[in-house]
Image (cartoon, rainbow, N blue to C red):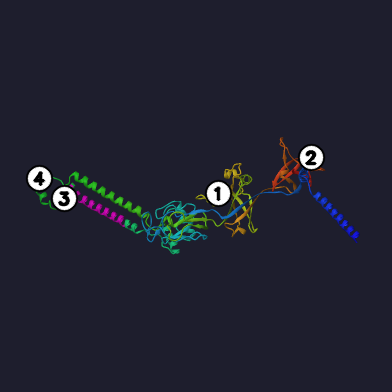
Amino acid sequence: MSRLSSRKQLGALVGAVVLVGAGGWIAGTQVHSPADAAAAHSAPKAGPVTVAVQRQSLVATVVASGSVEFASPRPLALAGAVGTGATAVGGAEGAEQRITKAPVAGKEIKEGDVLMAVNGRPVFALSGSVPMYRGLGPGASGDDVKQLQSALRRLGFDPGSISGNYRQGTASAVTSWYTSKGYEAQKPSADDEQQLGQLQQAVSAAQQTLLTTTSTSTSGGGSETSTDTGTDADTDSSAEGGANTPAPQSSTDTRIHQLQLDSARKSLDMANSALSTFQASYGTKVPAGEVVFFPKLPVRLNKVTVKTGDTATGPIGTVTSSDLEVQAVVPGADAELLRKGMAVELTTTDGKKAQGRLTALGADAVSSTPATGDSEGGEGDEGSEGTAAEGAAADTSDAPVQLRISVPSTGALATEAEAAVKVTIKIGASDGEVLVVPLAAIRTSSDGNVRVQVERGGKLSAVQVTVGLSAAGLVEVKPTSGTLEQGDKVVVGT
């Protein structure tokens, strides 16, 4: 038993030694020196990075983000005071100008509509290129009177001839127009009526003075026909009749009477002239603040900066046309590729598409507010060959350039005012499918030749090419020396 036990102990000992040795060998294989570790993690041998040549169609575009806005914004303000009751308010005369009915943002205004009310008086919108800059009334003449007459006729109130002269026919048409809108036309004020009465009295007084002076001159003229015979009888007879016969007048008296007569006549002429001048402007008027002329109607009240109770001086808000446009900004380098009249694709955030046209670049696109007398801006420029350098004074820098894009048919953008849209402008397209390589594959040598490096069978060879249209990081190439085919590998880096 003791011998068997000794053998078992020896076997266990040998097994333990074997296990320890195996463990040491395994651990030894997992331990590396720093040099071995560096060698195991060294980078592979450098080689060229290649991309396959492709054959496809290319479309070059300029892409930007834009915002949808209403076109032709212009500030809204009154040209002067409105009337109030039967009194024209002007300067220090009458009550302060207070808004009694404020304009409503978003409302569309057509010709003849009431924009707002001031002191209970209407402010009308009319179509015309000449801005309202004065009150219009009897005696006035000019292009502003002519466009008022034309507007009255369009609204169905006949002013008579469209002559540019404000006469009784125009006054009657204005009265009918105001009445149709529930307002009273601006009649002569109390001050006007008082002044008319004073002028009429002045004429009457001058007439009376002339009649008195004429009568005095006539009654004194009989002495000029009497004669002195030099006899006592004649003298006595003259003395007896002296009570009924005017005494002879001297030449000095005659001259005084003539001066008085001339003065009376001149005073009457002046009084009549003053009365005629005043009467020429006396009657129904259109105060300067009661009409706003717009180059094109309808317009849309885009923004309103006043409320009921505010004074009606200064800016009232902004009006736009009902048309939509898109404002966008592109880098200067992209702007140099653009021309007025280019077609534009507009895409909303939910994928709806609409078509537009590039109508202005640079400074021309900053504001579409037309100058007085101009039509709504930009439309006449379609198809022109203006560039960013012409319209925006753009240089070769990458400074941002403003774009304005008209939307002839709002379509998908009808409800997208103030929304963001993607702007895509096509500037060129390849003639069908062409060979294309990444721009990184193009190499230009010192002599100006353009080439690409092609890897075939592990070897590199240079192929001279000409380049064409580029888009989306790709460029069209045509081999001029050597061969280049679809699928060839061109070097784009190492």
Which amino acid lies under the numbered mark 2 shown in the image of this protein? Ser
Q: Is residue 219 rendered magenta in the image?
A: yes
The residue under label 4 is: 231
Question: Residue 10 location in percent, x, y?
Answer: 88, 56
Q: CA distance from mark 2 to mark 3?
A: 140 Å
The residue under label 1 is: 366
Question: Residue 259 location in percent, x, y?
Answer: 24, 46
Q: As rendered, which of 362 and 150 lies closer to the eye?
A: 362
Crowd tier of the residue under label 2, counting other residues whose Cα lies within 10 Å: few below 14, some 14–19, many 20 or above: few
Q: Horizontally, is 161 left or right of 385 in the view?
A: left
The residue under label 3 is: 246
Which amino acid lies under the numbered mark 1 shown in the image of this protein? Val
Q: Is residue 142 rendered magenta in the image?
A: no
Question: Residue 109 location in percent, x, y?
Answer: 51, 59
Q: Horizontally, is 468 left or right of 362 in the view?
A: right
Q: CA distance from mark 3 to mark 1?
A: 91 Å
Q: Viewer-nearest of labels 3 and 4?
A: 3
Which SS type dominates the magenta stretch?
A: helix
**Which residues lie in the magenta part?**
197-223
Residue 154, placed above or below residue 478: below
Secondary structure at numbered mark 4: loop
Q: CA distance from mark 4 to mark 1?
A: 108 Å
Instruction: State which tag comes first along the sequence, 2 or 4.
Output: 4
Instruction: State which tag comes first along the sequence, 1 or 2.
Output: 1
Q: Viewer-nearest of labels 2 and 4?
A: 2
Q: How many marks?
A: 4
Instruction: State which tag comes first along the sequence, 4 or 1.
Output: 4
Q: As rendered, which of 136 and 213 lies closer to the eye?
A: 136
